[in-house]
Image (spheres, helix red, strand yellow):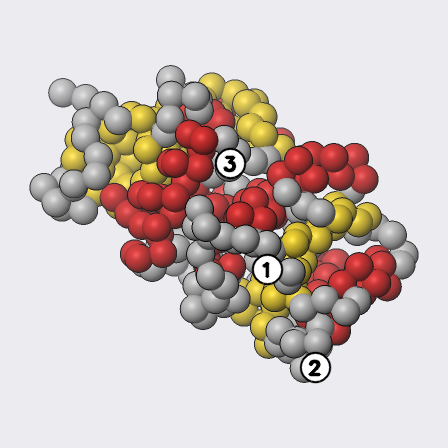
Amino acid sequence: MATNNAAYLVAEKAPLEVKPAPFPEPKDDEVIIENHAVALNPVDSAQQRLGPSIFPWLKFPAILGCDVAGRITAVGSGITKYKVGDRVTGYNMGTFQEYVPVKEYLCAKLPDSIGFAEAAVLPLCLSVAVKTLFHPGYLALDLPTTETKANGKVILIWGGSTSVGCNIIQLAKAAGFEVITTASPKNFDYLKKLGASQTLDYNSPTIKEDLLTAVKGKVVAGAIANGGLNISVYPSIVETCAAVALSSPDNCKLVPLTMVPRFPVPDGVETKFVVPLATDKDLASWIFNDYISEALASGSFVPAPEAEVVGHGLGSLQSALNTLDAGVSAKKIVVTMK
C-alpha cells in the first residue's frame, strides 16, 4: 500500500518538519495527484512567519502549499474529465505532501510539451488572475475566445513580473486589452514577450505621471494594485493605481488588490482583495478544464514566470521558503518531488 509524507508547519515561525501523513482518499469530485513538483508562493512564507493571527484558518500542524503538478493516481466516483495516469496541474491548500487531493474543476490537463516543474508555477496565481479580470465581483471583463479582437481599452497591472502579473498580462491581452505594466527595467523585454505593450519602471520618481501620460485619453478597464512582499510601498501602489483608474473617460472605480489593504484607501475608489477561485466552480472550470490546456498546447499561453528549481523532495521545502523570503524577480521557486 502506498504511503504519504508531508512537510508540516507545527507552530508559528517553526521550520517545516517532514512526517508521515494520512493517505488521501478522493471525494466524489476529487482526483489524487502523485506530486512531481510544487511551486512556492508568498502566502506560504507569510503563514509560517505570521501564523493564525493573520491567517485565522491556520491550524497546527498545518500542511502549506497551493500549487502541484503530477500524475493522477485515483479519481472520485463523479470525475468525468480525467483518468488515472493523466498529467495535470492543480490548486488546493496543502500541496506540501506526496499525494494531493484536488477538485476536478481546479485541475488542468498538461500537454506533453509542458514539464511538471514548468506547470507547477501556474495554479494559484492563474486562479487569482482569472478572478481579478473576469469574475462578476471584480472587473467583470468578457472572457477571451478565438473570436476576440482588440477593443481599444487598457488594463494596468502593477508588478508585471510577479506570478499574478505574468498571468494577468497574458489573459488580458487574449481578452483584447492593451496591457500596461510596471516592473524593473531588467524584466521589460520578458513582459513584452508575454503581451505587455508598455512597461514602465516602478522605481521611477515620476512613475505616477508616466502612467497617467501612457493612458491619457484611453478607456481604462482596470488598474490592478499588485504588490510584492514590501508592505511599506502598498499605499503608494494603490494611490497610483487609483489615479490611473479615475483618469479614464469612463473611470473604473474598483481597484482590485492582491495585498490586504491595511492602510487608508484613496477617495473615489473601492478596493477589493482578490482571493483564489476555490469555490467559483463555473469560472474555475472554464480556466482549468477548458481554456488553459488548449492555450498551453497551442503556445498562446506560457507558464510564467519561469520556474527556478531550488531543491528536490519534501526536505528541501524549508530552504526553498528561505530562498523565496530572500527575494526573487521574474522567477517562481519550485521544488521537484519525483
For mark 3, does the 10 Å Cα neighbourhood hold few (<14), some (14 to 19), or many (20 or more) residues? Answer: few
Q: Residue at x 89, y 59 (%)?
A: 206
Please report whichever mark, 1 or 2, sits nearer to the chain's N-terminal start. 1
Tag on residue 267? Answer: 2
Secondary structure, mark 1, is: loop
The single residue placed furthest to the bottom in the displayed view is: 268
Residue 138's x, y, as percent? 49, 67
Q: CA distance from mark 3 to mark 1?
A: 19 Å
* Disc on res. 300: 3
Q: Is residue 264 visible?
A: no
Name the residue: 16% across, 41% down. 79
- The tag on residue 151 is 1
Please indicate, yes or no, whether residue 309 appears anywhere in the rendered image: yes
Between disc 2 and disc 3, the foreground one is 3
Q: Residue furthest left?
A: 77
Q: Describe the element under mark 2 as helix, strand or loop.
A: loop
Which label number is shown at residue 268? none
| Observer-nearest of 214 and 228 | 214
- Please name the amino acid that badge 1 sits on: Asn
* Label 3 vs 1, first from the N-terminus: 1
What kind of element bears circle 3?
Answer: loop
Q: Quadrant of residue 88?
A: top left
Q: Nearer the viewer, residue 189 or 277?
A: 189
Quarter of the image with the C terminus is: top left
Q: Nearer the viewer, residue 50 or 67?
A: 67
Q: Earlier in the sequence, mark 2 or mark 3?
A: 2
User: Residue 96 location, x and y as percent?
Assistant: 39, 34
Amino acid at pointer 2 = Asp
